[in-house]
Image (cartoon, grey):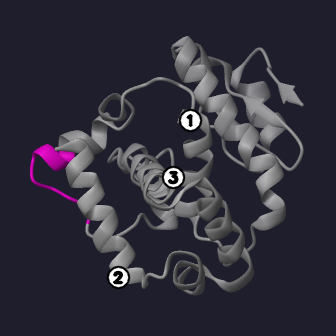
């Protein structure tokens, strides 16, 4: 179910205790709540990406637990959101591309706190872009079935064991390959 309240205050009430500030929409256990002011600022393609992203969260919750890292949860949802969007990678990851062109390549995958939409430093946008491109890297290099297997295994076994069992990589070797992919895609 997708709920589209008339005001941000109504969206906040529906989403409580989750915060809606800085977000266009968010997924609850069985519904999506649209924040009307932010959602209205998106292009049609942007709205499609956001809704596909949030819709992805709902069925994937069954494969998610405390062991699944936030970068994989959000990156997988963004991967699904951008899959048929026909938006160039450099446009979809504009903030991260600017950082990389300025010589600031991320050294690690984003931490859970990096996804906080209300951060004053704008880090959240880059965190989502980094996470999306980590999942896109897996899908491009190993195939979508392996990306799904990684997601499921991370929920069962933790991400380090999942990287080893599904991709044959250590965490460090995955980060190294992801950084090379970022440089190639966004430089």
Q: Which residue is mark 3?
A: 116
Mark 3 touching mark 1, by CB under 8 A? Answer: no
100 in magenta = yes
Q: Does the magenta portion include 49?
A: no
Q: Establish if 97 lies above or below 151.
A: above
In the image, the segment drawn in magenta is 99-106
Instruction: Provide residue 71's location: percent of width, then percent of height.
Output: 52, 61
Q: Nearer the viewer, residue 90 or 168?
A: 168
x and y, in percent, of residue 14 in the image: 84, 36
What residue sits 62% from the left and 47% below the top? Answer: 77
Q: Is residue 138 above or below residue 86?
A: below
Q: What whole-number distance in Å separates the C-alpha atoms at marks 2 and 1?
A: 27 Å
Number of the front mark, 2 or 1: 1
Crowding at label 2, few (<14), some or many (≥20) Cα neighbours within 10 Å?
few
- Nearest the eye: 143 or 47: 143
31 in relation to 182, above or below: above
Q: Nearer the viewer, mark 2 or mark 3?
A: 2
Left/right of residue 176 with respect to residue 157 in the rendered view:
left
Residue, disc 1: 83
Q: Residue at x 23, y 43 (%)?
A: 186
Dot 2 or dot 1: first in sequence order is: 1
Residue hosting label 2: 172
Q: Quadrant of residue 90?
A: top left
Q: What's the magenta bit mostly, secondary-structure-wise?
A: loop
The residue sitting at 72% across, 44% down in the picture is 56
Compared to residue 80, the image places residue 8 above or below, namely above
Query: Can residue 149 be seen by looking at this rendering?
Result: yes
């Amino acid at each position: 179910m997708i709920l589209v309240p008339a005001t941000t205050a109504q969206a906040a009430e529906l989403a409580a205790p989750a915060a809606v500030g800085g977000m266009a929409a968010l997924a609850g256990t069985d519904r999506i709540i649209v924040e009307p002011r932010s959602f209205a600022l998106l292009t049609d393609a942007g709205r499609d990406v956001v809704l596909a992203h949030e819709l992805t969260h709902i069925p994937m919750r069954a494969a998610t637990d405390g062991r699944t890292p936030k970068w994989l949860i959000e990156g997988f949802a963004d991967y699904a959101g951008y899959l048929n969007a026909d938006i160039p990678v450099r446009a979809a990851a504009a903030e991260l591309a600017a950082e990389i062109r300025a010589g600031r390549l991320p050294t690690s995958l984003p931490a859970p706190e990096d996804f906080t939409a209300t951060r004053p430093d704008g880090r959240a946008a880059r965190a989502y872009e980094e996470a999306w491109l980590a999942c896109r890297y897996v899908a491009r290099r190993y195939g979508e079935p392996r990306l799904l297997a990684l997601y499921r295994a991370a929920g069962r076994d933790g991400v380090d064991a999942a990287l080893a069992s599904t991709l044959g990589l250590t965490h460090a070797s995955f980060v190294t390959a992801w950084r090379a992919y970022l440089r190639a895609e966004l430089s």
